[in-house]
Image: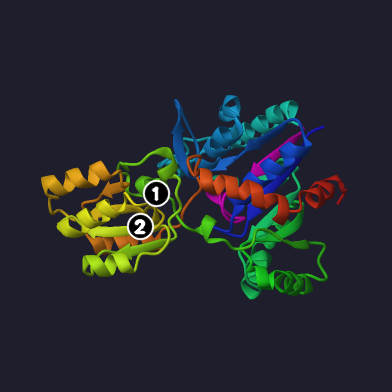
Amino acid sequence: MCKKLYIAATGQNCGKTTMSISMMHLARKKYDRVGFIKPIGPKIEMFGNLMVDMDAALMAKTYGLEEDISLMSPVALHKNFTREFLAGRINPEELEKSVVDAVKELEKKYDFLIIEGAGHAGVGSIIGLNNARVAHLLDAPVIIVTGSGIGSVVDSLRLNMALFEKEKADVRLAIINKVRYDKRQQIINLVEQAFDRSPLRITGGFNYSPILANPTLGHISRMFKLPLRANDRERSRIIHNIQLGAASSQKVVDSLLEDTLLIVTGSRDELLVTLSSLYHIQEYQEKIAGLIITGHAVVSDISQKIVEDSGIPYIRVHETTADVYTALSEDVAKITFEDLEKLNWIKSHAENEVDFESIDAMLEQNC
């Protein structure tokens, strides 16, 4: 009989996808056949000729589940999906059936099935398939991933639990994610106190890490929808610092930190040449992750040749430096199949920071 686990969250950017990757990695160490499904997919991409959720595509490519992709994202919310639904052109009963049927098919094939929700408990309500209702329909025990904190965690859990309880979904565990290592147990203990009269169990997830929080060069390229001149290793390099190339060339070089992305306007020929020349030196390769060359100013032919000959990764953006910096500051990096450094980090740290055996044992319990 296939075990099912529904991974929900109190909101966006809590680390739900990170937890799904971890569970998949850990479950595969214990079970021969482990599958994945994202029933409701609000963020889509093309997978061959299929339109699927980004997380379903990520898991298929990461764990070799490509043959299941048509089942892994049964309801992908394309741009006009909700409008068509409200106009009566999409049958709600057929949506529900597609989700239930996909899970039934995957249950036949796998010993352990990870079901990933979308956003907070209410996401999907507009089409009658919010996370809480889907979890109940699929008869899957639920764990809820939260961000870090105390008051905010308790508030968000109470808010989300109300809908799960209304839909009679079986919520068994809350995982507090992105916790500070030095306050981990203190935070867990205090949240446990807040739920001391509830059957909901509380545990910790991943400690906070800038490796997961910060973007890769590949992510930035996708964000701007522009080509990145880099190889696969450089594409997955994580950006830990962003620096504006506004000062003199010497000051910019002197202030370089590890894994720095430099935003440089195309008219700064002397800085582009300096950085490209330094990129030949190993010490500076460790500091310079890449360049974003901004603005409408044309880079001179000789400077462009020096940049390209150096092999320094770069993206050419015609927006202003201010607009690029603002976009990067407001962006939240989403993990993709190309982010090899992040994926490897998640898998290795999952074995120390995620208690899969306790979660697995919890699924055996009758509640």
Q: Which mark is residue 217?
A: 1
Of the two numbered discs 1 and 2 on the same chain, state the one appearing first in sequence: 1
Disc count in the image?
2
- Residue in the image at 31% along x and 51% along y: 279
Residue 311 seen in the figure:
yes
266 displayed left or right of 353: left
330 up-or-down from 97: above or below:
below
Helix, strand or loop for disc 2: strand
Q: Which colour scheme is used?
A: rainbow
Q: From what the image shows, is residue 59 above or below residue 274?
A: above
Q: What stretch is highlighted in magenta?
A: 111-126
Q: Which of 22 and 151 is in front in this view?
A: 22
For the N terminus, the image quarter is top right
The verdict on residue 106 being magenta is no
For badge 2, the amino acid type reads Leu
Q: Residues within 10 Å of mark 1 (few under 14, many from 20)?
A: many
Q: Name the residue under label 2.
A: 261
Q: What residue type is labelled 1?
A: Leu
Q: Is residue 121 magenta?
A: yes
Q: How far apart are marks 1 and 2 (CA)?
A: 9 Å
Q: Kindly identify the residue that appears in the image at 23 percent across and 57 percent down.
A: 274
List x then y, in percent, for residue 69.
56, 29
Front-most of 331 and 201?
331
Q: Is mark 1 on a helix, strand or loop?
A: helix
Q: How crowded is mark 2: few (under 14 residues within 10 Å), some or many (20 or more)?
A: many
